[in-house]
Image: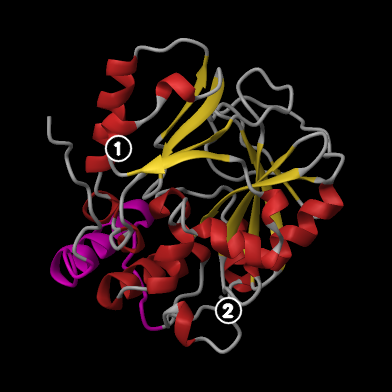
């Protein structure tokens, strides 16, 4: 049987007419007014302008940092390999996954988008898992969501050690919203997305956010919170906005991913002061990262 070959999508596909037009229409539908591309002010305006800029010209470095496999090199250079989850396997052929030699617990994920992961504990239906991975490999985040930086990524499956912080649903995901090295807020999520509280850098709860349907919960300040803040700042330095996702385990902090377009821009922040505060923190720059003097790859 010949394995299907999955490659990076054409980085010039979906540009201009489809990408830009659809993004402007989506913004207007969500926010009720036209997108101001000449002088964006709010967080969502700047996020959509970023997606439009990438749809026009691409961003090689943003694509590399969004690649859940290739970003490991960036993390190792800037904060050290000790903060990376152990890599068990990676490859483009979903039929080549070495299930027989994998440990009892591990994480499977695709490298070219979001919400494509599976936590494995014990025996699984391998046929079903392979079919799921094939669906992931065929997902096109550029055409589906306007996130064109995912378009230039060579698609593959990444398998890493399972991270365990004692939570039944998998480790809590601490999401640091960073603006050129400065942390503005920390969002806490879980594997089932049933919680979504936001905190400031002193771990005081900030009212509101998005996903109001999630259950109300208070999360204890992680024991290694100060170290996490340092790491998030280092990884985001020179990038006008990026969300740095980290995991807090008993003995170490582990990197999750870098996210440049959270929720593909569809989140509606409440109250609206969130839009103003995050927008003011973002010194928007629509140039590709490789052409910015402040960014060190």
Residue 249 place in picture, x, y as percent: 76, 35
Residue under pointer 1? 136
- 288 on left or right of 88: left
Instruction: Using the rendered image of the protein, determine whether residue 202 is visible from the camera's viewpoint.
Output: no
Q: Disc 1 or disc 2, which is closer to the eye?
A: 1
In the picture, the quarter occupied by the N terminus is top left
Residue 77 place in picture, x, y as percent: 64, 67
Residue under pointer 2? 283
Q: Quadrant of residue 95?
A: top left
Residue 200 vs 160, above or below: the answer is below
Q: Which residues are magenta?
A: 11-38
Instruction: Using the rendered image of the protein, determine whether residue 112 is visible from the camera's viewpoint.
Output: yes
In the picture, the quarter occupied by the C terminus is bottom right
Circle 2 Cα neighbour tier, 10 Å, few/some/many (<14 / 14–19 / ≥20): some
SS state under label 1: helix
Q: Quadrant of residue 131?
A: top left
């Amino acid at each position: 049987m010949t394995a299907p070959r999955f490659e990076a999508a054409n980085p010039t596909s979906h540009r201009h007419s489809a990408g830009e037009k659809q993004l402007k229409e989506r913004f207007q539908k969500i926010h009720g007014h036209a997108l101001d591309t000449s002088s964006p002010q709010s967080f969502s305006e700047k996020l959509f302008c970023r997606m439009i800029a990438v749809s026009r010209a691409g961003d090689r470095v943003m694509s590399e940092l969004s690649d859940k496999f290739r970003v490991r090199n960036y993390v190792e250079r800037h904060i050290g390999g000790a903060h990376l989850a152990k890599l068990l396997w990676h490859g483009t052929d979903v039929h080549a996954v070495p299930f027989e030699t994998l440990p009892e617990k591990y994480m499977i994920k695709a490298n070219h988008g979001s919400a494509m992961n599976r936590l494995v504990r014990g025996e699984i239906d391998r046929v079903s898992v392979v079919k799921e991975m094939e669906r992931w490999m065929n997902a096109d985040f550029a055409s589906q969501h306007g996130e064109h930086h995912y378009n230039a990524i060579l698609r593959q499956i990444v398998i890493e050690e399972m991270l365990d912080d004692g939570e039944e649903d998998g480790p809590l995901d601490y999401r640091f919203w960073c603006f050129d090295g400065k942390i503005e807020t920390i969002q806490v999520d879980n594997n089932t997305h049933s919680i979504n509280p936001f905190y400031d850098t002193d771990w005081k709860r900030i009212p509101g956010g998005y996903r109001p349907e999630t259950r109300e919960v208070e999360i204890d300040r992680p024991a290694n919170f100060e170290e996490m803040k340092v790491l998030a700042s280092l990884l985001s330095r020179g990038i006008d906005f990026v969300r740095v996702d980290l995991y807090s385990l008993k003995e170490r902090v582990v990197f999750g991913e870098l996210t440049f377009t959270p929720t593909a821009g569809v989140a509606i922040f409440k109250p609206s002061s969130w839009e103003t505060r995050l927008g003011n923190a973002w010194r928007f720059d629509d140039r590709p990262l490789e052409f910015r003097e402040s960014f060190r790859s």
